Each structure stands twice: as structure tokens, then as C-alpha cells.
């Protein structure tokens, strides 16, 4: 299906949550995706790192109250968080903080790992990844870093077209 052009590398983006507004960021893939050469991005895994106001701050201390943190990565701009059955959704994370009992991610296990090897992964031919993050309660300042482990691949003409059509169909 795909021929790897590069080894696995990591793309990162950090969002800061300080209130209950959905935060938004993008990872530009324009340098990695080339329609003419049928070049796309193969995502192998997505990791989420939650930290306090700075890299040394404890996350629980930054929150001050029970918290529900949601972060999602999509290959289409949906304008906000989406349901789990949305075809544009690549990966998601939910972290619940209970001030009494501590953190839990039981409702949405992360990191999302798409398997090892060249045949496993999520293929993206769009020019951006869209990241949305939201906290359920106002926080002093909370940072979430999204780490996307990917490689550049060349797809067959049929596979590239199928992925592009699916992405376009998901836009509706």
C-alpha cells in the first residue's frame, strides 16, 4: 500500500488551557504532503502530555478543582471537539482529575498507537492536522502537548485517491 520515504519522526504542538474555552492549534503538513508525487503522512502514534503552568508544576496543583480535560487531533477542521465516530478524528484523549482520588484516563485510553511496521498507521493526505483541547473548569494555566509520531510515505495512485475521497466525504 505505501512505501516509506523517511524513518519515524515526531511533530509536536502545545496548547495552554486557562478557562473553559476550546483551544485550537494546527500542525502544518504542507512540507510533508505532495499530491503530484502521491506523498502522504503515515501516523504511527499520538501521545498527550499534560503539565501545569510550567514544565515543573504539578498538574493537580494547577487545577484547583475536579477537572475533565479533552484533547483531539483531526485531519479536517471541525471547529471544535467531535464525537468518536467522526471520520476526521485521528486521536483523542480524556484525562479526568479528581482532587481526592487523583488522575484517571479510563474513559479514553491514550496514547493512541496504530501498530508497528510500515503497513500499520493512519494515512493523512490533508495539508494540516487540527488540534482541539478543552478543560471543564477554569484552571490557573494548564498545558497539553500533542506528540504525533509519523513518517512520510508514497502511496499507490489508487490508495492516494481512496484516502483523498474518504477525507472529502468526511467533510460533509
Image (cartoon, rainbow, N blue to C red):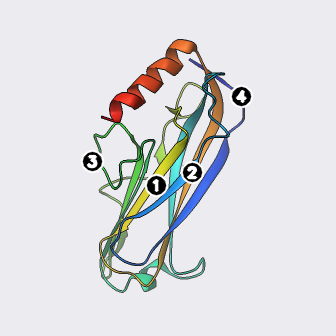
Task: Locate residue 104, reporting x and y percent.
Answer: 35, 66
Residue found at x 62% / y 50%: 11
Q: Circle 1 sits on which residue? A: 131
Label 4 vs 3, first from the N-terminus: 4
Q: Circle 4 sits on which residue? A: 5
Q: Is disc 4 in contact with disc 3, using a CB cutoff of under 8 Å? A: no
Q: How many marks?
A: 4
Is residue 66 rendered to the left or right of residue 42?
left
**In this picture, is 12 found above or below 20?**
above
Q: Circle 3 sits on which residue? A: 83
Q: Is disc 1 in contact with disc 4, using a CB cutoff of under 8 Å? A: no
Which is closer to the viewer, label 1 or label 4? 1
Residue found at x 57% / y 34%: 42
Residue found at x 36% / y 65%: 22
Q: Residues within 10 Å of mark 1 (few under 14, many from 20)?
A: many
Task: Locate residue 122, reporting x and y percent.
Answer: 49, 34
Amino acid at each position: 500500500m505505501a512505501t516509506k520515504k523517511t524513518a519515524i519522526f515526531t511533530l509536536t504542538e502545545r496548547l495552554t488551557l486557562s478557562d473553559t474555552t476550546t483551544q485550537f492549534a494546527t500542525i502544518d503538513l504542507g512540507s510533508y504532503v505532495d499530491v503530484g508525487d502521491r506523498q502522504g503522512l503515515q501516523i504511527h502514534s499520538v501521545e498527550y502530555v499534560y503539565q501545569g503552568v510550567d514544565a515543573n508544576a504539578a498538574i493537580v496543583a494547577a487545577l484547583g478543582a475536579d477537572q475533565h480535560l479533552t484533547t483531539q487531533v483531526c485531519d479536517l477542521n471541525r471547529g471544535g471537539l467531535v464525537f468518536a465516530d467522526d471520520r476526521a478524528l485521528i486521536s483523542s484523549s480524556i484525562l479526568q482529575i479528581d482532587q481526592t482520588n487523583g488522575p484517571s484516563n479510563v474513559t479514553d485510553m491514550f496514547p493512541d498507537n496504530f501498530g508497528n511496521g510500515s503497513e500499520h498507521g493512519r494515512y493523512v493526505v490533508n495539508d494540516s492536522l487540527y488540534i482541539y483541547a478543552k478543560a471543564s473548569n477554569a484552571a490557573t494555566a494548564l498545558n497539553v502537548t500533542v506528540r504525533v509520531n509519523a513518517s512520510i510515505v508514497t502511496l499507490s495512485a489508487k490508495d492516494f485517491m481512496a484516502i483523498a475521497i474518504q477525507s472529502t466525504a468526511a467533510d460533509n
